[in-house]
């Protein structure tokens, strides 16, 4: 991933990289924390990349030790769902301690029109994604 920043731009609080793979886009997000602003920013980049490549299937390999708190999630979710509408997203989570909270966020998102699923392995994610 090549980053183009001007002198006045602050560095992003996350690193997002993309790799085109057969049938889907692989995206890796790495951050020390997660806020609604970070979530909307990286999902916006993801949506733009999918539109640019004409892809609708995505694996998000999540290397973030936290998830957004429930109250913030509730208020930011509508914007996030608009960004990922029409995408089928398999999520890999490098921090199992956050799986329960992440599962809850996925359930709430799916109830509002998203198509997300948490997976324990890339093989499992690819099988679901490409089915």
Image: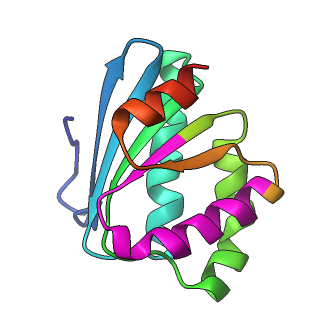
Tell me what residue is drawn at x 58 percent, y 65 percent. Answer: 103
Q: Is residue 1 above or below residue 13?
A: above
Tell me what residue is drawn at x 51 percent, y 41 percent. Answer: 90
Q: Position of residue 17 (x, y in %)?
A: 27, 40
- Whether residue 94 is in magenta: the answer is yes
In which quadrant of the rendered image does the N terminus lie? Answer: top left
Identify the main secondary structure in magenta: helix
Q: Position of residue 59 (x, y in %)?
A: 44, 37
Q: Is residue 125 left or right of residue 66?
A: right
Q: Is residue 38 above or below residue 58?
A: below
Q: Is residue 127 above or below residue 68?
A: above
The number of discs equals: 0
Q: Is residue 89 above or below residue 49?
A: below
Q: Magenta segment, which residues? A: 90-110
Q: Position of residue 127 (x, y in %)?
A: 50, 25
In which quadrant of the rendered image does the C terminus lie? Answer: top right
């Amino acid at each position: 991933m090549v980053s183009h920043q001007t002198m006045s731009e602050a560095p992003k609080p996350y690193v997002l990289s993309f790799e085109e793979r057969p049938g889907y886009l692989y995206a890796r997000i790495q951050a020390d924390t997660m806020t609604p602003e970070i979530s909307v920013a990286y999902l916006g980049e993801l949506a733009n990349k999918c539109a640019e490549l004409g892809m609708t299937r995505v694996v998000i390999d999540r290397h973030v030790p936290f998830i957004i708190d429930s109250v913030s999630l509730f208020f930011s979710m509508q914007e996030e769902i608009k960004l990922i509408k029409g995408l089928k997203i398999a999520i890999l989570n490098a921090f199992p301690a956050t799986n329960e909270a992440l599962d809850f966020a996925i359930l709430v998102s799916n109830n509002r029109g998203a198509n997300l699923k948490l997976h324990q392995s890339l093989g499992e994610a690819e099988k679901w994604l490409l089915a």
